[in-house]
Image (cartoon, grey):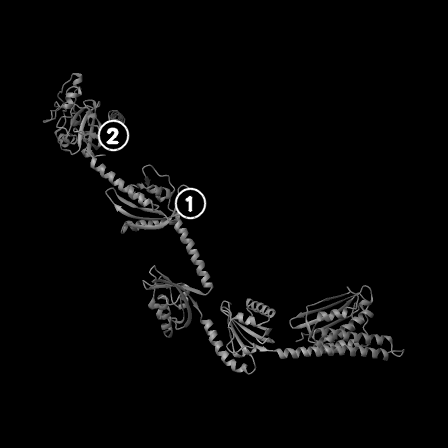
Amino acid sequence: MLLPSHLAPDQALARAPPTIQRRSLRIHSEAKGGAVGDSDAEPVPGARRATKGHCAAGSGAGGAHEIAGALQTYRLIVESMTEGVSLSTEDGIIVYTNPAEDRMFGYSEGELIGCHVSTQNAGPGEANDDRVAEVIGTLRREGVWVGEWHNRRRDGSTFYTASRITAVMLDGRTHWLCVQRDITKERAERAAHAGTKERLQLAVEGTGAGIYDMNLETGIGYWSESVFRILGFVPTPDGRATVPMWRERIHPDDADSVLTEHKRAIGGSGDFRQEFRIVRADDGKTRWISVVGRMVPDAVGLRSIGTIVDTTERKRVEAAQRDSEARLRVAMEAGKLGSWWFDIESGTGGWSEYSARMLGVSAKNRAVTFGEWRGLVYPGDRVAAEAAFAAAIAGETPIYDAEYRVVHPNGAVRRLHAVGAVERGADGCATYVVGTFRDVTDERNASEALAESAGRLDLAVTAHGIGIFDWYVQTGKVVWTEQEETLFGLRPGSFGGDIADWAKCLLPEDAEAMQAAMGEAMAERRPRLDFAFRIRRPDGAIRWIEGSGRFLYGDDGTPLRMVGTNMDVTERRRAEDHQRLLVNELNHRVKNTLAIVQGIAHQSFRGPAVPAEIRSAFDGRLAALSAAHNLLTRESWEAASIAQVVADAVAPLQSGRVETSGPDLRLPAKTAVALALALHELCTNAAKYGALSSPDGTVAVEWVVAGEMLRFSWRESGGPRVVTPTRRGFGTRMIERALAAEFGGTATIAFPPEGVICTLEARLPA
């Protein structure tokens, strides 16, 4: 151990004035025949001389050596020191010991003089010789040796000293000056402390934590192996580390905050706790660590002592948990659900931001008491809400399920549906409740409004045999009026009340079609659906039901309800079937009548008095009328397709020479007949005199819709040169007058040289 310089005799002597240094001690060796002689200075009174001790007698080295020339001041210093001081020759013969040295080794005064220094060593002979040779070699090279030495007392007991041996020159010869102190007890305490420290370190590092002890004044300190591994370093043998090693590993983005926290700890309580990122020295990877430490002042300077834990995995788990919670929160909010929780022991809880918005309050970073929740509940609903909560806590009900109104701070009233699950301890007592809120205000308002409306409508529709139904889409519940049950042949109150019970009443093929139609309507968010289906009553009778339903959707488009009416239309359906039978019979008779007219015409036009051209024109017009009649018969005389009217009219002409284009429109029966007759006139004229009378002629028939207007055109090209007629024939007059009148528009025929053009412009038929 290094001693204070002012207590080291060799250093004190070296610092003495030159006049004193010149009066150095001279040692005469008896082996050379010399005797203790005078020094340059006066002998120091009371100087210790070698006496005949056991070392002197057995050493064979000759007589003792006399120390002379030392100043009285330095003698007093050395003699009064608590550290042991000895002086030996370069060969290891002891020539001086102070009283502390004698006491330390258990010898009387002067008894060690003349002994070899190995007398004081506790090591075995050969090992001791090697150690001595090593120390002497160091002294000869460096002039000083500092370390611990294992010693033996006169009684054979051993002890340890912290020694400093310095090479000094006396009378021109090298001597070894040794200053040492007993550290046996200190070593034992250090060993015990090291054992405790090792056990503590093992315990701490068993948790994955590392220990550090850094001197902030010197910048040097100690790291446990775990700290080295966490920071990406190879552990040093003695655990030595430096502040720059630590500082350089802090992530650049976190460096300022770490420095600020350290300064706060130094200027405050000294405690330091922070979590930040580091960049490992070996692989450059970023890791999260948690540091907990304290600033501790000592004699050397300010020390920072604490533990380091790698928290990267915990951070990853926490991030994954936050992501999971975020996804759950998004899913719940998408379902219009807010969460809440309540700790029964503490009497406090909380709610999510979405729940807080339902309640009209804030929920950020604060606990919520039962009293605060109670204060939000509508006064008229508090007793029932509290009773439901108490029943769930007591285990009287499996879950907490209640619906109540809340009053927002701005006075708005909303209705919530609360559901909660109760967690219980090992003793069965309730400890925690967690649940959800759902705002059902819109649903309840709609339900109440419809209930009122149903009451009013019931009086109006009962007399007309109209049944009313109310289907709650999300639950499948169906509510029927008594008249609805009567339509289905059921006794009042006997309907099952579920959508599946309704489906059982329908014929299977109709039930499947109805469910598909309702699903499609809700998927497309249509406001209403008209329908017709057959039912089988309990008595086996098949009845036709027609109706219409209106859908009610939530703010997010979720279908909530379908409310509508049903009527028994069986008798009307039978009447329509009978009417269709009569119409078909009438159509048959009309066709027979047209055939009779055609026969009469043939008989009447026979003979040379009636030109063949007139007979042919009459037959063609009659055939066109018959074709239009047939088309309308197929369409039940309701409406006919304009495309089909055109196709039937141009069918007798040469295929490929007439091009048609236009959207599919439905024409009323009377309008369709007029268009068919007009097209017959145009086709006949084109075939006889117009474009279709020559091999290269063509006709383009086109109709387009622009807004509410229909534009129809007939355009001939490639035929003989057209000459404007001098008079208007039957066909021209029929097109420009009758056709225009039926369509409620204008019809014109133009005769440019390249081909006839007929155009019609009119509003779309209603």
- Image location (x, y in percent) of residue 273: 32, 50
Q: Is residue 474 left or right of residue 108?
A: right
- Image location (x, y in percent) of residue 739: 73, 76
- Image location (x, y in percent) of residue 654: 79, 66
**What's the amino acid at mark 2?**
Trp
463 or 218, which is in the foreground?
Answer: 463
Q: CA distance from mark 1 to mark 2?
A: 46 Å
Residue labelled with disc 1: 285
- Image location (x, y in percent) of residue 226: 35, 43
Is 354 located above or below residue 207 in the figure? below
Q: Is residue 77 visible?
A: yes
Is 645 located above or below residue 137 in the figure? below
Residue labelled with disc 2: 145
192 or 145, which is in the foreground?
Answer: 192
**What's the amino acid at mark 1?**
Lys
Quadrant into which the C terminus falls: bottom right
Quadrant into which the N terminus falls: top left
Q: Secondary structure at mark 1?
A: loop
Q: Quadrant of residue 152?
A: top left
Specify few, some or many for label 2: CA neighbours under 10 Å numbering under 14, 14-19, or 20 or more.
many
**Of marks 1 and 2, which one's residue comes earlier in the chain?**
2
Q: Is residue 376 visible?
A: no
455 or 303, which is in the foreground?
Answer: 455
